[in-house]
Image: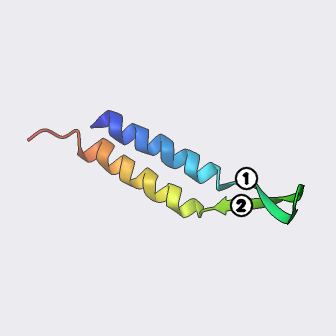
Amino acid sequence: MKAVGSTLMAIGLVITLITGFKYITKEKVVDIGNIEITANKKNRITWSPLLGLGVILIGGAIFFLGSKKN
């Protein structure tokens, strides 16, 4: 369980530090016979750093509470 908890904490840290990314898609603007004009469209995906903090807390709980033996 410690491995799962530490992995979740590392993923949460990455999510907290990197709050999004950009990607480019090609969009067809004009298509007349053999003539085709495309344009690059920039898209962005973002998320809140609080999501990463939540994952860190869940990973910490699994790390510390999951290792206890009855």
Query: Looking at the picture, which amino acid does disc 1 mark?
Result: Tyr
Q: Residue 57: give x, y in percent of width and height.
A: 41, 54
Q: Which residue is mark 2?
A: 44
Going by the picture, which residue comes out furthest to the front?
A: 33
Query: Looking at the picture, which amino acid does disc 2 mark?
Result: Arg
Front in this rendered view, residue 14 or 23: 23
Give the distance between the C-alpha atoms of the residues marked 1 and 2, in whole angstroms. 6 Å
Front in this rendered view, residue 65 or 36: 36
Front in this rendered view, residue 63 or 34: 34
- Sequence-wise, which precedes: disc 1 or disc 2? 1
Q: Which residue is mark 1?
A: 23
Q: Residue 51: give x, y in percent of width and height.
A: 51, 61
Relative side of 19 to 5, left or right: right
* Quarter-of-image position of residue 3: top left
Query: Dot 1: what SS?
Result: strand
The C terminus lies in quadrant: top left
* Looking at the image, residue 39 lies above or below residue 63: below
Relative side of 17 to 29, left or right: left
Question: Mark 1 and 2 residues: CB-CB less than 8 Å, in contact?
Answer: yes
Going by the picture, which residue comes out furthest to the top?
A: 3
